[in-house]
Amino acid sequence: MAEFFTNRITHIYFIYGLGFFSLGLAVALEAGRSSGSRLARAMWPLAVFGLAHGFHEWVEMFEQFGVLAYGFNSPAWLEWTRVGLLAFSFASLIAFGVRALTNSRRHPMRDVWVALGALVFYGIGVLFLGAWVGGAAPAWHHVSDVWARYALGMPGALLAGMAFWTQGRQLRSTENASFANDFVWAAITFFLYGLVGQIFVRPSLLFPSTFVNQDLFQSWFGFPVQAFRATLAVFMAIFVIRALRLFEAERQQQLATAEAQARDAIARRDALRGELLRMTVAAQEEERARLARELHDDTLQVLTALAAGLKGTEQILTSNPEQAAAQLTRLSAMSSHAIDELRRLIVDLRPSVLDDMGLAPALHWYADRLDDVMPTQVVVMEEDPGCRFSAPVETILFRIAQEGLANVARHAQADHAAVRLSCDLEHVYLTIEDDGVGFDPHDLILADDASHGWGLIGIEERVSLIGGDFQVESTEGKGTRLHVTLPVDPALSLTLEDDHE
């Protein structure tokens, strides 16, 4: 049996290298799109280990092929290249284990520093071993190979096995428990590779390889340790590749969760929009009822009194001119009062200053009115006071300012509020900010009970109608900032001028 394996040692090295190269290639392809788990973030060092170790075995395969077929003796540079690949691959395996077992987000470079430290430690050992063997090339190469397996290969394989074992144990209590066995078997192959595969090394002057080496392994089991390592490499690749399916399952679960959250958010927003529409209709009816009451209780009564007074004045005009003159004076005052009330109602519906002078003067006018009815001091600032925009844009911005300042009055408990208006060639910008109590915008709008967020939803709806952008920035205890961006020349998808109806 020993002769059978000896004659096919190059085939063993080929399978050995192919197993690790396949592992590294599969992990590299998965690492670029892996999930956010700790093990997934550690995939790149494992991919580097697989690829580098696979190339190392193929270099040794070509060396063995040259010896068997042509009596070729490897030059020193090729031997050092092979040993360097071996050490680098094992250092990458150490980096994988460290990154998979520790919190890489809190210590993002720990794996790199540990791997570099291990390589430095290995390099110092190589120099001491070179001095010990007198720099003789074959002996120095052999002890360097053995030292790489002792100092780097064993701890690297054990760390990797521990990482896979830990992940497998964690999976047993989750919905992905079906993948746990793959991680456990991958851990077992790494443990065997480190504890058995790296103990039985080539004979060298370095203890204990003087007697615990690959010759001892072959005398015990009847086949070379390279065949054992190649078998482990194949199973290691199989179980690791099977374990990688976990990340695809996690991505599918995350996608399903995101889709469910999106559907829930859309349903909630649709419900809020329906409620907003209901409240808008209710507010319109309430406003109409208020106007009817005011017209009936004040203006209509004044007009009725005017009609009765004029009729009475007509009756006494010829008989008592002085009383008729006094009566006309009172009627004139009543008519002036009626006119003032009608003018107030009209201004409440839509201020004429918005149509006559533009948005900036209308904002100043509205801020002055608010100073008389709310404790918050409102300041309006604009870059170009004379700038005019299209009627829909000015109407929407004025209504947004009204709603925003109304929210400040109702909820903010602010001492100061500022309205900023600016524009460029394509957009107009409106910002409303206060120094009030603030809030969490996400919780306010998407909460199950979002009745106090209808004002913001109404603003967002107005902005979206003409392709604008609406942003809310707020922190509890630090005030609120509303920022609106509208196109200067919007393409309307709906009739916006409800104020002109």
Image (cartoon, grey):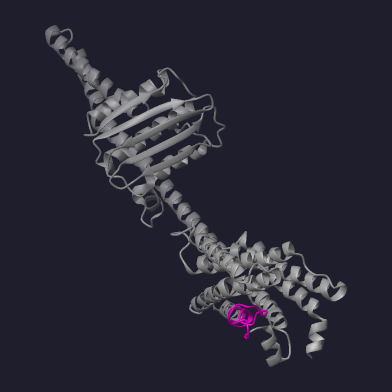
* Residue 408 image-quadrant placement: top left
Q: Please, is residue 380 above or below residue 272 in the view?
A: above
Q: Position of residue 381 (x, y in %)?
A: 35, 25
Q: Position of residue 179 (x, y in %)?
A: 58, 77
Q: Residue at x 47, y 31 (%)?
A: 497
Q: Report the number of numbered marks.
A: 0
In the depicted view, which residue is nearer to us: 45 or 156? 156
Magenta stretch?
192-212
Q: Residue at x 71, y 88 (%)?
A: 218
Q: Position of residue 49 (x, y in %)?
A: 63, 66
- Left or right, residue 164 beside residue 78: left
* Residue 353 image-quadrant placement: top left
Q: Can residue 177 be seen in the rendering of this structure?
A: yes
- Left or right, residue 71 beside residue 379: right
Q: Can residue 256 be seen in the rendering of this structure?
A: no
In the depicted view, which residue is nearer to us: 96 or 181? 96
Q: Residue at x 40, y 35 (%)?
A: 400
Q: Is residue 233 magenta?
A: no
Q: Position of residue 137 (x, y in %)?
A: 70, 68
Q: Main secondary structure of the magenta part?
A: loop
* Residue 46 image-quadrant placement: bottom right
